[in-house]
Amino acid sequence: MDGTFDNDLSKIVDMDRDHVWHHLTQHKPFETGAPRVIVEGKGIHVWDQNGKKHLDAVSGGVWTVNVGYGRESIANAVRDQLIKLNYFAGSAGSIPGAMFSERLISKMPGMSRVYYTNSGSEANEKAFKMIRQIAHKRYGGKKRKILYRDRDYHGSTIGAMSCGGQDERNAQYGPFSPDFVRVPHCMEYRRHEQDGAPDENYGEWAAEQIEQVILREGPDTVGGLCLEPVTAGGGVITPPEGYLQKVQEICRKYDILLHIDEVVCGVGRTGKEWFGYQHYGIEPDFVTMAKGVASGYAAIACCVTTERVFDMFKDDAEDPLNYFRDISTFGGCTAGPAAALENMRIIEDENLLENTAAMGDYMIDQLRALQDKHKVIGDVRGKGLFLGAELVADRDTKEPVDEKLAQKVVAECNAQAVIIGVTNRSIPGKNNTLCYSPALIATKDHIDEMIAATDVALTRVFG
Ligand SMILES: Cc1ncc(COP(=O)(O)O)c(C=O)c1O
């Protein structure tokens, strides 16, 4: 990669400006400036239309390219599979689908069934539908409410947004689907914003706030609880000690199915373990995953569940409605599981779970050192290579910085050819957390570069 490209990229940029509607983007600035077009990637770097090389500290922008760019072995696995069989509807099996399910389940004790689909939103919708169908089948339709937390995000469809705790993402897209009920979050750093939150045993207290909602709604009306083990776009929020264990205890007490959304955390992002929830010793009923499953080399998402849940859909074979009457056309694409198998092999053979844990520890220490230097950093948190630095105008009151300033820090990092992220149109007034999620192959040198760029950017913006 030397910054020269075969195509006339100015024409590509014109085509993009004229016809592509970018995700999550206000297009007015493109009337005068050029949109960014990413042209190539290798390892942890990408090149833009100007041939400029960037260090990608956000794995493709949204926590996705876990094993890095330019993996020929994944491309070859996909190519070979596409020539052999590109597609058949998911009502039949496929060789890579069967093989990946077996490999995946071997990493998930307690789980046993994989339902393939093609996006994180859709994987979550599958779990919602399964919970709803169980409610109809077992409880006359009554136990149909699904709880979700403030600040969590579960996808972009109207169903997933009905289960979405980010008010700025949801604004202007309602009305939403009924019987999704919001419960409080568990953000230790901002616990003073919750009435009565204690300094000690906050995790247990935060879980009990969910129980209060269950009792208010009536436990016989609540069928599921959906949450992110480490909240991503809502602020990179790790659960406080004891929280998830207590949440599981409450779910079991009231016969509520626990659905863990691992769309961001899944497949290595949090280091050491394959999944975020596995750090906390819980056994969910549903685990959904997408982004890192095949690192973006092919579209694949999975809704994984237990044999206990699966059995509920086959126990009465005489009833014509008693199976999961759902299909996802592209859930039958074989490129996804073929890429996912090779992705998993790479993570294992290159010891990327271990690297993620070690580099995550290194990076959080470096971010804490930055926090000592820049008083605008109020909190640093995360797990593995999934980290955030929350920017505040005042450390005592924890008043968030103006989000335009947080965005300026991102722009100043960009100017130094380091792409970092910031929470974006999620919580009103609180889109103030810088996000770092480099590929799991990141080295200390890469991390030093990200930290140095952030240091310069913070100095430029805040002095
Ligand atoms: C936690 C979480 N769940 C679900 C989704 C939705 O995934 P997708 O964009 O693949 O539909 C996202 C996307 O960012 C996410 O962060």
Image (cartoon, helix red, strand yellow):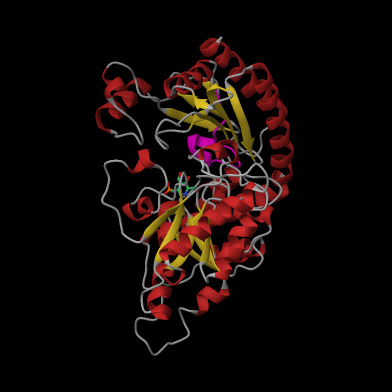
Q: Quadrant of the C terminus?
A: top right
Whole-percent x and y of residue 199?
65, 41
Question: Is 229 left, or right, of 330 in this rendering?
Answer: right
> Is residue 288 visible from the viewing direction of this image?
no
Q: Is residue 448 magenta?
A: no
Number of labels in the image equals: 0
Question: Is 455 left, or right, of 157 in this rendering?
Answer: right
Question: Is 384 left, or right, of 408 in this rendering?
Answer: right
Residue in the foreground of this view, choosing between 280 and 40: 280
39 is higher (above) or lower (below) than 125: above
> Is residue 2 visible from the viewing direction of this image?
yes
Whole-percent x and y of residue 405?
46, 19
Q: Quadrant of the N terminus?
A: top right
404 is higher (above) or lower (below) than 314: above
Q: Residue at x 68, y 23 (%)?
A: 448
Residue in the foreground of this view, choosing between 272 and 346: 272
Using the rendered view, name the quadrant where residue 383 is placed.
top right
Q: Residue at x 32, y 17 (%)?
A: 33
Whole-percent x and y of residue 129?
39, 66
237 is higher (above) or lower (below) than 452: below
Question: Is 214 left, or right, of 363 in this rendering?
Answer: left
Residue in the foreground of this view, choosing between 388 and 140: 140
Q: Residue at x 57, y 75 (%)?
A: 307
**Residue that lies at the very extreme toward the bottom in this rendered image:** 318
Q: Which residues are magenta?
A: 54-70
373 is higher (above) or lower (below) than 421: above
Whole-percent x and y of residue 153?
44, 47
Residue in the foreground of this view, choosing between 438 and 345: 438
**Residue that lies at the very extreme toward the front in this rendered image:** 196
